[in-house]
Image (cartoon, rainbow, N blue to C red):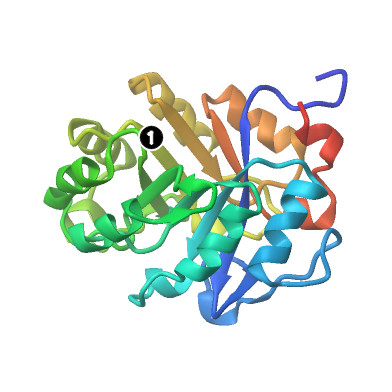
Amino acid sequence: MTDGRLPPCRIYGVLDLQAGDIVHATGGRRATYQPVRSRIVASAAPRDVAQAFVQQLGLRAAYVADLDALAGHPPNLAALATIADAGLDVLIDAGCADAERARALTGFRSSCGPLAGIAVALETLPDAALLAELVQTIGAERAVLSLDLLDGRPLARCQRLAGCRVEQIAELAWQAGVRRLLVLDLAAVGSGAGPMTVETCRRLSQRHAWDELISGGGVRHAADVAALAQAGCHGVLAGTALHTGALSRSELSG
């Protein structure tokens, strides 16, 4: 990285959507989240932040966490459309815990086309037995298991999965047809302390040839992205570092 650019790895700009605004997420404490404050955009409106990611930073992909949908409300499809229309390939995490929600998200179209990825989140999945059905409904090319952690421990709605090790959950996912995996430790999100998932991703990347292994949470700068890439990640989530300028367009362009 002598030229200051990142190793080959797709950067997903993080857009945490809550009550119609893009918010700054910290540690998974969603009741405390506030509209994002950024060096690259003066607004917290989804359209404006998405356009800044594209125009100011040259990003082409976004991870959108619809926090209201994760809490049980319908997805904010209008906001989702404005984000996609900015020119971003969207990976959406919107409480996809049953076939009805999966069909609604797979049927979504913006002027730029369908969603690039639909997450099934460990924190909202009610039963591990549903995972194969959801993967089939979404399609293996778009289905992403969000392997949610809190301080390294699975953050799972399903009690069976809550008692499993990370490797066991990844194996169950692979057997269910999951080929895209997101490993996210909520304790690190917005912490500025660096990613907590590097070694976990290294182990998981050695177990299976994932079509895409993504991670993030606490990413501070280019060295953190490089560490995740070297651990086997194909994609990295970045949020705070984009808004503070700690990850610049010149680094992201590599």
The number of callouts visible is 1
What x and y, as percent, mark residue 203? Answer: 42, 27
Whether 50 is drawn above or below 79: the answer is above
Q: Residues within 10 Å of mark 1 (few under 14, many from 20)?
A: many
Residue furthest to the left in view is 129
Residue furthest to the front in view is 111
What x and y, as percent, mark residue 187? Answer: 53, 59
The image quadrant that residue 223 belongs to is: top right
Tag 1: amino acid: Arg
Q: Is residue 31 left or right of residue 143?
A: right
Q: Which residue is mark 1?
A: 180
| Quadrant location of the C terminus in the rendered image | top right
Residue shown at 73% from the left, 47% from the top: 54
Q: Is residue 61 left or right of residue 174?
A: right
Q: Nearer the viewer, residue 119 or 185?
A: 119
| Quadrant location of the N terminus in the rendered image | top right
Q: Is residue 91 left or right of residue 228?
A: left
Residue shown at 73% from the left, 56% from the top: 51
Residue shown at 65% from the left, 22% from the top: 8
Q: Nearer the viewer, residue 44 or 199?
A: 44
Q: Nearer the viewer, residue 19 or 202?
A: 19
Residue shown at 60% from the left, 23% from the top: 230
What x and y, as percent, mark residue 50? Answer: 68, 57
Whether 86 is drawn above or below 180: the answer is below
